[in-house]
Image (cartoon, grey):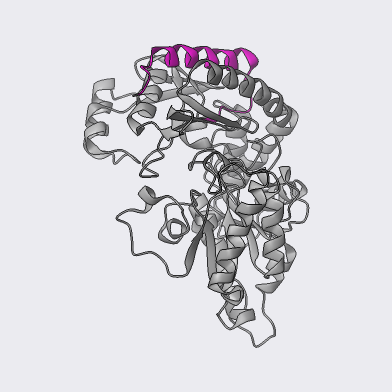
Amino acid sequence: MSQYNTDQIRSLDKEYVWHHLTPNAAAQKGMPLFVKGEGLNLWDIEGNQYLDASAGGVWVTNVGYGRKEIVDAISEQLMQLNFFASSMASKPAAIFAKKLIEKMPGMQRVFYSSSGSEANEKAFKMVRQISHKKYAGKKNKILYRERDYHGTTIAALSATGQSQRKEQFGPFVPDFVEFPHCFEYRSQFGETEDYGLKAAQLLEDVILREGPETVGAIIIEPITAGGGVILPPEGYLKAVEQICKKHSVLLIIDEVVCGLGRTGKWFGYQHYDIQPDIVTMAKGVASGYAAISCTVTTEAVYQSLQEDSAEDKMGYFRDISTYGGCLAGPAAAAANMKILEDENLLENCTELGKILLTGLKALQAKYPIIGDVRCLGLFCGIELVKNRETKEPVDESVAIQIANACKQAGLLIGRTNRSFEQYNNILNMSPALCITEAQLEHILTILDEVFASIPVPE
């Protein structure tokens, strides 16, 4: 790498790299080119320093940058054995599966793959195969929630409730059916004390409309991430669980963003006293040090996808993920989990998350453009509005302006990006769980300065 200078690297980038979520006009202006990370700090190739409050831009680096213990664990494992297909056993896969299941009471089996989209694809295939084995193929529909996001592959995108994410990529996979959101700030019912139960009833209405005998599963994020950092209203998830049990519908919880400590518990669903049938995860599982995702099931789901007899040659789950056999993943994940435990990062997430929420509420009181603030742990959303009374969203250009101003000030935050026609108006933050109180105060100071500089939207 040292043989290339900065200008050469930028030239190569513009000529050869196809950047994610980036139109060519922006790419040709030159993308940020980061070269070093330590803790929450990043440095670009020109030497500028940034505080990353976005966990690598997409909610990934839960334990921060520059973790030598994870790098060493990967290196040691790869020198011993780097890969063999996951149809065979391996030491790191067995050890991490045990450690993971210990954090997930009621769950039992871990299927490895390499991305969140892939983890959800595996879950969908499990549902479809169970439909064939138990219900003559009829109970095959998978319901997904408006505003939730489940991945970029065609099936995962078919299960995504974000219109702009899906536009121009259809036609989609049949028998994925949307049900309404549970976003209390933008309630379908106006002001109500029992919004969570009413929103859950909207799910049951869809199940009854489609026919419970045709619905095999629902998939939801415990907290809607890219759709606006939407926390479930009181009573909602428990009611959803009961509805699923009532109609023999499997409950899939997508923990790709919330998993491994982001909300202050190991998994987001654990705040709400529910028992999923399938849990998917990626991103923070290894904090970006290696590509790994997991589809975790109950023993009942696992056993239902085994042969029914010696003659049943097709009854087991006939699936593979090539890089589910790369041993860097579980080695990194085990080291990542050890850091979370040894440094009490879930507790740090909870305590500093409370401070962050208090600080953001103070900014909300100060700046009318902030219509709502939503946080659980170190997972926060700031909804921007033209008018607090009407809740009319600002144009997405305002969110872009604020995110860019923060970057100019040395702070990296996220925002909804080409997700909705109207609601790309939400800023989000997800700093690494090892953040200090001083770093948190620095974030709040920069946000205060940026909001003070933004003209009031008309």
Residue 342 on image: x %, y %: 74, 29
Q: Residue furthest bottom?
A: 311
- 167 left or right, relative to 221: left
Residue 178 on image: x %, y %: 49, 60
The one nearer the camera, 126 or 340, is: 126
Residue 111 on image: x %, y %: 62, 58
- 172 left or right, relative to 188: left
In this view, 301 is above or below 291: below
The one nearer the camera, 41 or 11, is: 41
Q: Say which residue appears at 68% left-offset and 73% top-offset.
A: 304
* Quarter location, residue 442: top right
- 28 left or right, relative to 204: left
Can the viewer see residue 318?
no
In this view, 33 is above or below 335: above
Q: Say which residue appears at 31% left-offset and 28% top-offset.
A: 31
Magenta segment: 428-457
435 in the magenta segment: yes
46 in the magenta segment: no
The one nearer the camera, 114 or 252, is: 252
Quarter of the picture containing the C terminus is top left
